[in-house]
Image: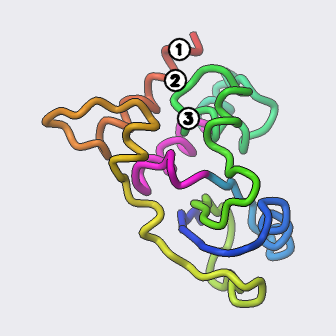
Amino acid sequence: MLDVIGIKCEKTPAELIAHFDSLGIEAVLFNPDYICGKDHVLSAYLHAERAFSRSVNRSKSLLSEIILYASADRQIGRAIKKMSPKKGDTEFVILLIGNTDDLRLDEIGCKRDDSLIDCTETSAKNMELEKSSIPYTELILEHVAAVDIMKA
């Protein structure tokens, strides 16, 4: 199962990863200021999975490859720096891979807020999307897909 959620909490990224690991869920954390909708994250996952299945991945792990695609960049180091939550952040977008029926967010003092996933003017600007007749939520999918071309 896959899910993309937004949460607000005082935990560090490492604490959040450990929490989801304890539930048997793989988690990729993103800075919400760089996310342009749920499909942005899901598309990055699908492209990364395909890259691994075709042995054209640039990174050693699926989770890093997902970040690469989500960033719409071809350099893993830049992608991780761009997309990862910063020290002190209290808002996160998280891709969850696994059984997401009971996330036990209350146990770690987190509140779900899926509005963090929405594409905002800030996230569109951060992802270098140009204003046009095409919605940002569609433009970002083109940028994610373009990573395949940049990697070649």
Q: What element carries label 2?
A: helix
**Picture layout, residue 17 above or below residue 152:** below
Three-letter residue code for mark 3: Ser
Q: Is residue 109 left or right of residue 114?
A: right
- Identified by mark 1, the residue type is Met
127 falls in the magenta region:
no
Callouts 2 and 1 close, C-beta under 8 Å: yes
What kind of element bears circle 3? helix
Residue 142 rendering spot, x and y as whole percentages: 36, 30
What's the distance in space between the residues labelled 3 and 2, CA to CA? 9 Å
Specify the quadrant of the image occupied by residue 20: bottom right
Question: Disc 3 and disc 1: Cα gap in Å?
Answer: 12 Å
Residue at the image position 53 percent from the left and 14 percent from the top: 150
The residue beneath circle 3 is 71
Choose the circle earlier in sequence order: 3 or 2: 3
Mark 2 residue type:
Val
**What is the number of the mark on residue 150?**
1
Q: What element carries label 1?
A: helix
As drawn, is 109 to the left or to the right of 33? right
Looking at the image, residue 42 sits to the left or right of residue 17; the answer is left
Residue 37 in magenta stretch: yes
Could you tell me if residue 53 is visible in this image?
no
Q: What residue sits right under mark 2 in the picture?
A: 147
Residue 122: percent from the left, percent from the top?
Answer: 40, 46
Q: Residue at x 68, y 51 (%)?
A: 85
Tell me the magenta residue range. 31-49
Which x, y percent locates residue 136? 29, 42
Magenta segment, prevailing SS (helix, strand or loop): helix
| Cβ atoms at labels 3 and 2 below 8 Å apart | no
Task: Please identify the quadrant where the N terminus is shown.
Answer: bottom right
